[in-house]
């Protein structure tokens, strides 16, 4: 038996209010882009030392989360966990929406978005940025093809193959995103092969957290049943992914502390970095790791939907702290021009760079989140994406195999 997928009616006041709210946020984000483009980046908090600011925090978070959001679909078609099969279309749609939202922020923060065509037609294959263009577009194409095989009955036999390609590509995408930082040898904060697997591990947690929030909101808003068994599975999986992400964060910092050249940076982030140290310990570790993990360990977590919402929201909050510390904190730490020597000049060499996010930057970031939300809202209304029911009875019924066709010859006696 298969769990039926149905469109969201989208006729309620709540749906239109959410649609209007996200549309307004997206519009304000576009106005912020116009303001920055018209007046120049002098109106932002970015400078010659910190060239990637709050928009990049939002963009990288959305791109990394897009990769992780596809995991629910991958567990069905790649790893054979059929309980997640009915959630696979929503997983794929959310992955595409998050990637589009992140790339929108990234493109509009470049300063000359009209020159995107140059980046798409002239490639420097020594640049990880050029390679990421192929990774982004390839991921989009594979996931859309994957969705087509799932939703078109005649193409269902190709779903496992399409899912495998999408899974492999999502790993490559997250590796490429992490390598943007790992290949920057000039920055003490980066210059580490550990950043690529770290981003892969973090994507598992970030993507699933957003998927759970969207799933709970959609089923509650549509009034469709969502059973405790599925909720418990997702909550336990989220706890595991949070622990895996913490493990790789720990390994990354232990690896840095093993090498003498990284000791100053580790001291900066862990002890003397001011706002970056606070964000690391309070935001990333306490709020983004310890609290969600503790909340999700309750044996009756399936009956505690508000606790799950709180835990996943904390994971997202910790994710922004993680991205801020990694991207902005990594640039704030002064470049080591001559190892073992102190450098002072009128160009702020050897000085920790200052950065205060401006309102337009923050509005642009939220505009990208709103665009991702608008895509999901419209798709679930136009296409059969959401399970009609996902209560425990429906989930157990979906595991019952169809009766085998009889091979007894016609006319044979019983």
Image: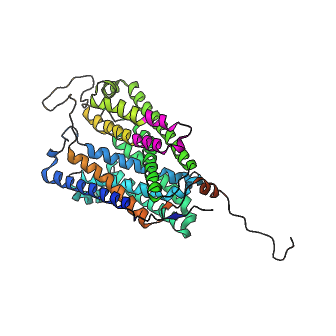
Q: What stretch is highlighted in magenta?
A: 289-315
Q: Which residue in the rendered view is the most extreme toward the front?
A: 13
**Front-lying residue, 332 or 297:** 297
- Taking the magenta stretch, the answer to whether it contains residue 298 is yes
Residue visible at 31% across and 44% down in the picture:
57
- Taking the magenta stretch, the answer to whether it contains residue 304 is yes
| Rendered image quadrant of residue 381 | bottom left
Q: Is residue 201 left or right of residue 32?
A: right
Q: In this view, does 176 lie to the left or right of 268?
A: right
Residue 327 drawn at (x, y percent)? 30, 39
Residue 45 shows up from this direction: yes
Quadrant in the picture for the N terminus: bottom right
Q: In this view, does 412 lie to the left or right of 217?
A: right
**Front-lying residue, 119 or 320:** 320
Q: Could you tell me how many numbered marks the image carries?
A: 0
Identify whether 345 is placed above or below 230. Answer: above
């Amino acid at each position: 038996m298969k769990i039926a997928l149905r469109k969201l009616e989208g006729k309620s006041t709540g749906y239109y209010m959410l649609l209007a709210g996200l549309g307004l946020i997206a519009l304000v984000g576009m106005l912020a882009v116009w303001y920055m483009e018209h007046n120049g980046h002098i109106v932002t908090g970015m400078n010659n030392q910190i060239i990637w600011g709050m928009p990049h925090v939002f963009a990288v978070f959305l791109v990394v989360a897009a990769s992780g959001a596809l995991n629910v679909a991958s567990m069905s078609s790649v790893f054979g966990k059929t309980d997640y099969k009915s959630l696979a279309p929503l997983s794929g749609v959310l992955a595409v929406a998050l990637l589009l939202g992140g790339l929108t922020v990234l493109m509009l923060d470049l300063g000359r978005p009209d020159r995107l065509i140059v980046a798409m037609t002239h490639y420097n294959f020594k640049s990880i940025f050029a390679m990421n263009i192929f990774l982004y577009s390839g991921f989009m194409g594979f996931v859309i093809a994957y969705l087509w095989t799932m939703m078109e009955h005649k193409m269902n036999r190709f779903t496992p193959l399409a899912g495998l390609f999408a899974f492999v590509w999502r790993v490559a995408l997250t590796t490429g995103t992490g390598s943007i930082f790992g290949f920057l040898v000039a920055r003490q904060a980066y210059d580490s092969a550990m950043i690529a697997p770290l981003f892969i591990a973090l994507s598992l947690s970030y993507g699933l957290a957003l998927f759970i929030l969207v799933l709970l909101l959609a089923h509650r808003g549509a009034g469709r049943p969502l059973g405790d068994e599925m909720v418990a599975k997702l909550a336990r999986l989220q706890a595991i992914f949070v622990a895996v992400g913490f493990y790789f964060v720990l390994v990354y910092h232990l690896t840095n502390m093993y090498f003498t050249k990284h000791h100053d940076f580790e001291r900066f982030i862990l002890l003397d970095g001011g706002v970056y140290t606070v964000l690391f310990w309070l935001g990333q570790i306490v709020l983004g790791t310890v609290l969600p993990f503790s909340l999700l360990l309750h044996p009756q977590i399936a009956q505690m939907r508000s606790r799950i919402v709180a835990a996943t929201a904390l994971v997202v909050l910790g994710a922004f702290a993680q991205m801020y510390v990694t991207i902005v904190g990594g640039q704030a730490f002064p470049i080591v021009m001559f190892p073992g020597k102190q450098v002072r000049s009128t160009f702020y060499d050897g000085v920790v760079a200052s950065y205060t996010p401006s309102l337009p930057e923050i509005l642009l970031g939220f505009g990208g989140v709103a665009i991702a939300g608008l895509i999901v809202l419209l798709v679930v209304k136009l296409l059969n994406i959401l399970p009609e029911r996902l209560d425990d009875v429906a989930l157990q019924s979906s595991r019952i195999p169809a009766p085998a066709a009889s091979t007894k010859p016609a006319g044979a006696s019983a």
